[in-house]
Amino acid sequence: AAPPNTNPLQQQQESVKKLPLVHHSLYKPPPYRPRPEPRVHHLTARTRPQQTRHMLPVDQVFRPPVCNLWRSKFHSFNNLQSEVAQALVNSDDNIVVSAPTGAG
């Protein structure tokens, strides 16, 4: 037991001094692991001509009840949505989709 004339803060400081030190190797970051290069798709009229584009039906991407969220408003995704739908649904990858202002 601590002597009666020590305050709780002093007692806590004394108990911390008695704890074993953590070895510095535990603070090391994980080893470097190269990541794959991101996949970049440039969808333009030249790289994806109009005749090769398709509109994917919602129920081919999602199963009920999830597809019911969209099917009540539209039956298929637009061209751009159709291009990225499988990557969004079947992957945990981060995705950035950008388009010029006014592109729709």
Image: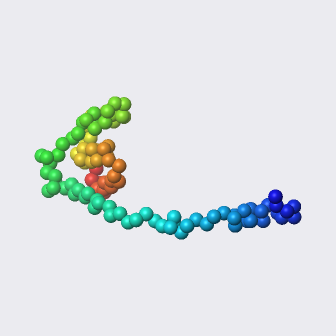
Residue furthest out toward the bottom: 24
Residue 73 appears in the picture as rendered: no
Quadrant hosting residue 73? top left
Residue furthest out toward the right: 5
Residue 66 appears in the picture as rendered: yes
Residue drawn at point x = 24 percent, y = 47 percent = 83
Q: Where's residue 90, x and y in %?
A: 30, 44
Q: Nearer the viewer, residue 33 or 104?
A: 33
Q: Where's residue 58, x and y in %?
A: 28, 36
Quadrant hosting residue 100? bottom left
Using residue 24 as the reference point, say whether residue 39 is left or right of it.
left
Residue furthest out toward the left: 51
Image quarter in which the N terminus is found? bottom right
Residue drawn at point x = 35 percent, y = 63 percent = 33
Q: Where's residue 103, x and y in %?
A: 27, 53
Q: Nearer the viewer, residue 20 or 26?
A: 20
Residue drawn at point x = 21 percent, y = 41 percent = 55
Using residue 86 as the reference point, say whether residue 44 is left or right of it.
left
**Image: 86 above or below 10:** above
